[in-house]
Amino acid sequence: MPEKTPAVELHEVAYAYPDGTKALVDVSLVIQPEERVALLGPNGAGKSTLMLHLNGILRPSAGHVRVCGLELADETVREARQRVGLVFQDPDDQLFMTTVYDDVAFGPMNAGCTPEETDHRVHQALHAVGLVEVASKSGHHLSFGQRKRIALATVLAMQPDVLVLDEPTSNLDPRARRHMVELLSTLMSTLVVATHDMDLAWSLCDRAVVIDHGAVVADGPAHAILRDEVLMAEHGLEVPWAVRLANADCYNQTP
């Protein structure tokens, strides 16, 4: 059988900010369709910079980025942004229309969808995040957790092949966090999830990539990497509670 086209390919990608700060250093990654990848690392490691390369908001100083076989360039960036949906950490960066319906409809309408297709996508996306009933409300009148889910709906309405999420569970109370984790677990898209929530990475992702100082320092099965206490500590990370509890149970067992 022919091999599937990777969902994301980065080949020796480097990026430096205008002040000369090196944010990415020779990053090479291949992510297959429907993989769920946790992007881990301390603050300032380069995670956000990497995510912004995946739909062309930033362009590499060196190297190449491809999404679904499409190399990012001036003439392809519009199509690439339809294939790769980016959900920012702060939902208010994505909600700016008068109503939730209008926020979710904005992308499809500007992509040239008919009113009928736009309406179908809006209701489909709101149903996916469990918030059909708030379509006529202002997003700014909703709870923070609801706004996070609406921001996700604005991206789902574009029907992307790849979903890139920046800290999807940050600043959520336990109930809202549980709703978000349950929601993400139902999605069939390729997922790239930048997070400091190690329990989210443990429960949701099958692969983990650790970045530090702009370089990939570890890449492998999520449960293997997240169990590696030495690796995690070296890069300012902590093992998930599930691992700590399992280790404590083993330690406390009577011989």
Image: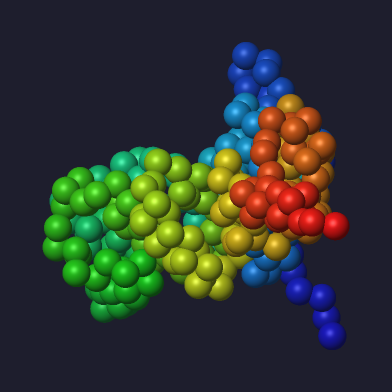
Between residue 185 and residue 175, name the one nearer to us.
175
Report whether 152 appears left or right of 35: left
Q: Is residue 80 above or below residue 182?
A: above
Picture coordinates of residue 67, whole percent (x, y) = 66, 58
Question: Quick one: quadrant of the C terminus?
Answer: bottom right
Nearer the observer, 46 or 169: 169
Residue at 58% across, 41% down = 196
Q: Quadrant of residue 16?
A: top right
The residue depicted at 40 percent of the width and 52 percent of the height is 174
Residue 228 visible in the snapshot: yes
The residue depicted at 62 percent of the width and 14 percent of the height is 19
Of 238 and 130, nearer the camera is: 238
* Rendered residue at 65%/31% (across/down): 42
Residue 110, image x and y in percent? 34, 59
From the viewer's perspective, is residue 33 above or below residue 172?
A: below
- Nearest the viewer among 139 and 142 is 142
Residue 17 appears at what percent x and percent y?
63, 22
Residue, far bottom? 1
Where does residue 2 sit, x and y in percent of width and height?
A: 83, 81
Image quadrant in which the N terminus is located: bottom right
The mark total stands at 0
